[in-house]
Image: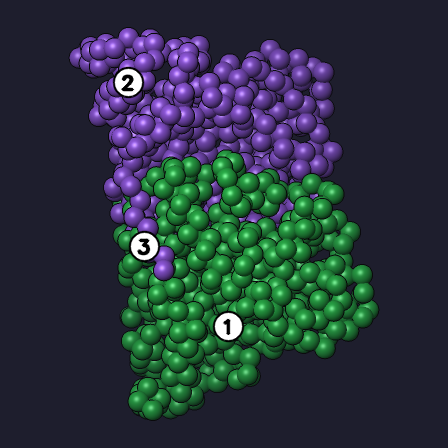
Chain colours: A green, B purple
Amino acid sequence: MIKSFHPPQRILMGPGPSDVSPRVLEAMARPTIGHLDPAFVGMMDELKVLLKAAFRTENELTMPVSAPGSAGMEACFVNLVEPGEKVIVCQNGVFGGRMKENVERFGGECVLVSDEWGTPVSVDKVKAAFEAHPDAKILAFVHAETSTGVRSDAQALCKLAQQYGALTIVDAVTSLGGTELEVDAWGIDAIYSGTQKCLSCPPGISPVSFGPKAVAKVQARESRVPSWFLDKKLVMGYWGGEGKRAYHHTAPVNSLYALHEALVMLQEEGLENAHKRHDHHHQALKAGLEAMGIQFLVEEAYRLPQLNTVIVPEGVDEAAVRSALLNNYGLEIGAGLGALAGKVWRIGLMGAACNRRNVTLCLSALESTLVQMGAPVNAGKALAAAETFYQG
Amino acid sequence: MIKSFHPPQRILMGPGPSDVSPRVLEAMARPTIGHLDPAFVGMMDELKVLLKAAFRTENELTMPVSAPGSAGMEACFVNLVEPGEKVIVCQNGVFGGRMKENVERFGGECVLVSDEWGTPVSVDKVKAAFEAHPDAKILAFVHAETSTGVRSDAQALCKLAQQYGALTIVDAVTSLGGTELEVDAWGIDAIYSGTQKCLSCPPGISPVSFGPKAVAKVQARESRVPSWFLDKKLVMGYWGGEGKRAYHHTAPVNSLYALHEALVMLQEEGLENAHKRHDHHHQALKAGLEAMGIQFLVEEAYRLPQLNTVIVPEGVDEAAVRSALLNNYGLEIGAGLGALAGKVWRIGLMGAACNRRNVTLCLSALESTLVQMGAPVNAGKALAAAETFYQG
């Protein structure tokens, strides 16, 4: 007989999921009601308002896709890429590669612009790609690369796409709620995110927003979208404007309670304050890590405060360090992905996990573990450096 | 400022979501852990064992798709239908129509076998379709039609498909946990279900199982699956057999806690006992409804005990009745869908909602409401009839 599962209590400082606030967990456990119940429909309306505020957009088609971030990505590509169309995809980490997979699976032709992992998307290379392929219909890039901790210049890339008459699809899975993100002011046409990063919700839902040009493209589309579940024309009848909601699929009621609560908390804190908090604790963590002698992968100007990718010191068994942190402290940090596997750690400071207690715990636990393993780090300096920053 | 959302407490006796047990809600609110945490991976292994038991299968590829039932449907069709292939789709309600949409969107050629809504799939018509289309590769049908409350003969249909060398795709969204369902004994090749019906979980996850022939077809497939999120070849690396799990997408951690708990409860009760319970309370509800003079849409032999579709009495404003039940009793029953809109109510007795208290409440509240509206029903008889049944 299998028994009830009681998870250990962790501190989640990896690349997501991040720690979920007790307020959000409690919201998730509220009684399930029908997905067509007037009370639920009212909650959905509020959710749209809250999501629009988080994305900084007036886009009417702003809604949570009923599945994780990779389905949000697919919702953008499957609706906006028509067979035979050219799409410029920027790859500077794992998720650009997934975008390429999406384009190809939906019959698009991918023009790949590659940059080294750990560096931002090169605006110049994208410009050159547009010059070589003036018929490209879409530019797709990752704002905050979860696999490397790099922030690319979304504003400049969107401006470029507009100059060449292309739509933009932007991955904001790790940026939403943690870093400046301006959907309307930057002219982003389609964007997707995740709940389990800086919004500090359990994973499973993907906030998505389509601007007027993206909606027009969906409506003018000639070929049928090769997905029923993610077809925005159908979904619009459920989440769209006014009037009676047409049944499309059964919404994940309790997961949406959780997202609503997380967004209410973000509204209470204020978006700018949330960004400042992420930056503040990042600075403290950085001071401590550098005092220990640990180097960042990413150049300072392009670092994501919510995801700190650092280089594993010479000779250290990185998996053993992560296991020791998990087993001795209940502390999760992330491994490297793809080309960076074995070479870096990814230390998240996302949402509810982004606080002074966690910075202090992470520095102390990491230092103790590394010193015990005989790693080449400066002992006894990290905490003082973080403390100096906090007091400064 | 938008405030926290506190849902009203309902009794969910519609076509799903059904009432969720407090045990499951509590499980959902347990602390989120990482989706690659060894403790989570252990939970996933248990979840597979529990799902296999519920589906009555040894299929190694048995897993929860990270999205609602309609994504589970899509996972089956997008992986198994190759462009140009003929698929026989049985339509006797809304969900057969959605299957047709799936086949066409993935480039298949649909051979439609239609039966009147409220009647089961005709095995003879399917046989005729196979005779006319011996090159059909797949037979797709709904075991328990959520839009009509009809059970079709899945065993006979699967046998027929085997005779003609076709795979089967079966919709068991409303049957799993409520009605006899034998994936291995009946030779079902691919099946999907939902969590929010007889498993009494919040909506958002779709249990899916692929048998050996379906897996072989996926592996031999020449064209790339037009979905990254639902590509079973990729998902197998995460949920598949042994060894290290490859990262595919971030699993909806807390929703899977809930499903695990619901399946532990089903294991405790026993699958056969759960079926008997659904049948038992259905009989009591039926006795009460018939004493009131309310007729069932579906012939007795094909009724689903967990979903009672009854005809709205002459001259009654059906929407007003549902509103009155919701507002005065917090009781949700379902409207008709598609061709049956305005003509029927769908009264669910699913999972945790299937109990004597709910049967009694539903009969009493419905009778009071109808009598107040001057509807042509026999007053004062329903409760006594249900009581007589319960006493035996």
Where residue A346 appears, as percent x and y from the top left, is 46, 72
Q: Position of residue A163 (x, y in %)?
A: 74, 69
Q: What SS does tag 3 mark?
A: loop
Q: Quadrant of the N terminus of chain B?
A: bottom left
Whole-number angstrom distance, CA of label 2 to CA of label 1: 58 Å
* Residue under numbered circle 1: A180
Q: Is residue B325 left or right of residue A198?
A: left
Q: Tell me which chain the residue with mark 2 is part of.
A: B
Q: Secondary structure at mark 2?
A: helix
- B121 in relation to A318, above or below: above
Crowd band around label 2 with a 10 angstrom C-alpha radius: few (<14), some (14–19), many (20+): few
User: Could you say where residue B358 lies in the image, as x and y percent from the top left?
Assistant: 25, 26
Foreground residue, A138 or B55? A138
Q: Check residue B4 in the rendering and tell me which mark sits there, or answer none.
A: 3
Indicate the amino acid at tag 1.
Glu
> At 63% across and 33% down in the image, what residue appears?
B101
- Identify the residue at image location x=35%, y=62%: A265
Same subunit, tags 1 and 3:
no
Question: Would you say B5 lies left or right of B56 here?
Answer: left
Residue B90, percent from left and from top: 59, 22
Q: Secondary structure at mark 1?
A: loop
Q: Tell me the quarter of the picture where residue B48 sits.
A: top left
Q: Is residue A334 visible?
A: no
Question: Share a chain, discs 2 and 1?
Answer: no
Disc 1 and disc 3: Cα gap in Å?
25 Å
Image point (24%, 24%), residue name:
B361
Query: Is residue B73 among what the camera can see?
Result: yes
Q: Between residues B124 and B390, which one lies in front from this camera angle?
A: B390
